[in-house]
Image: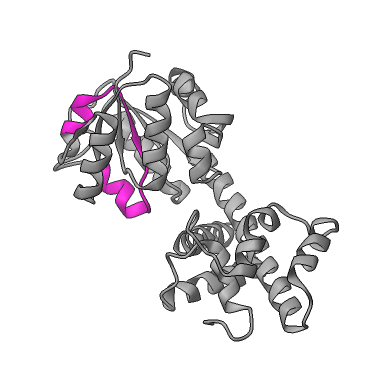
Amino acid sequence: MSENIAFVGVGRMGANMARRLKDCGYPIVAVYDMDAELAAAVATELGATHLTRLADVTASADVIFTVVSDDAAQLSLFAEKGDTLFAGATGKTFINCATISPKTHVEIERRAKKTWVFALECCIASSIPQARDGTLFLMCGGNPTVFERVKPILEKLSNTLRLIGPAGQAAQLKALVNMVMNINTAGLAEGLGLGAALGLDLTMLREVFGQTGANSQVLITDSEDMQKRVHECFFSAAHAAKDSAIACDLAKGVGLTLPLAVATKAQYERMVELGMGELDKSGIAELTFKNRKG
């Protein structure tokens, strides 16, 4: 395990991925984050160096993971001038894990090819606990040779690892995964909200849902939280709004109208407007239960 690894973005997901790789024997040599205090703390924990210039991150490592929040942040890391991860990056490999629009992944690969840099999109369809224990569902897009180059590293993070296709395709698939997940979450919140308004026992209702056609993965992960109003954040409402918007934009681009996706996007955008964007996506129940915030 000779590759030196750096992380750009050490929030809950990035930090736990770094912890996992360190546990597996990989040297985590550097971390960078816009939150300097957070980056310094994570660096101390991992025995890494906290760097404040992107070019220094590239110089320090062979493989650099980026785990940021949106298209603008991702593109700023790979700017074509100024302080950028591309500075002195020839031969380095970047694994980009942000849930962003497919076109941004395509653009980053275009820029990478101009500078003889290796880039791979690596979309995550799991949450924070899976990052820590190495059971992420990873969907990759890009050059198969680059994928094979970093596959041993990714296998330490994942129990399901797939190369989907060229740059952009993994991000398309991730958008669809999150679109359906968000729709299911909104539907579950409405079912439980209506059940509560009718006076039904919600514990019983959740059990019946689990034994019938109303069953879903979000029933397992979110229904108790909706009932008990516990919305500790594993996947934020703000991210749900962003990801639903990506899916709706993809649909618009191919001439499709997706009314459920549009309605779900509006619900999550409403959460953000009400100051609930940092709640977990399960917090959408606050909009559907009577006498709650919404």
Q: How many marks?
A: 0
Percent position (x, y) of residue 243?
A: 50, 57
Where, by quadrant of the figure, is residue 125 drawn?
top right
As rendered, which of 111 and 236 lies closer to the eye? 236
Q: Quadrant of the N terminus?
A: top left
Nearer to me, 56 or 13: 13
* 128 inside magenta stretch: no
Q: Nearer the viewer, residue 202 or 249?
A: 202
Position of residue 33 in the picture relative to residue 93 (left or right) = left
Extreme residue toward the bottom, this view: 291
Percent position of residue 221, x then y = 63, 54
Q: Residue at x 41, y 39 (%)?
A: 16
Q: Specify whether residue 161 is in view.
A: no
230 sits left or right of 117 in the view: right
Residues drawn in magenta: 56-79
Q: Quadrant of residue 58?
A: top left
Asked if the magenta segment contains residue 72, the reply would be: yes
Residue 281 percent coordinates (x, y)? 54, 62
| Figure check: 196 above or below 91 | below
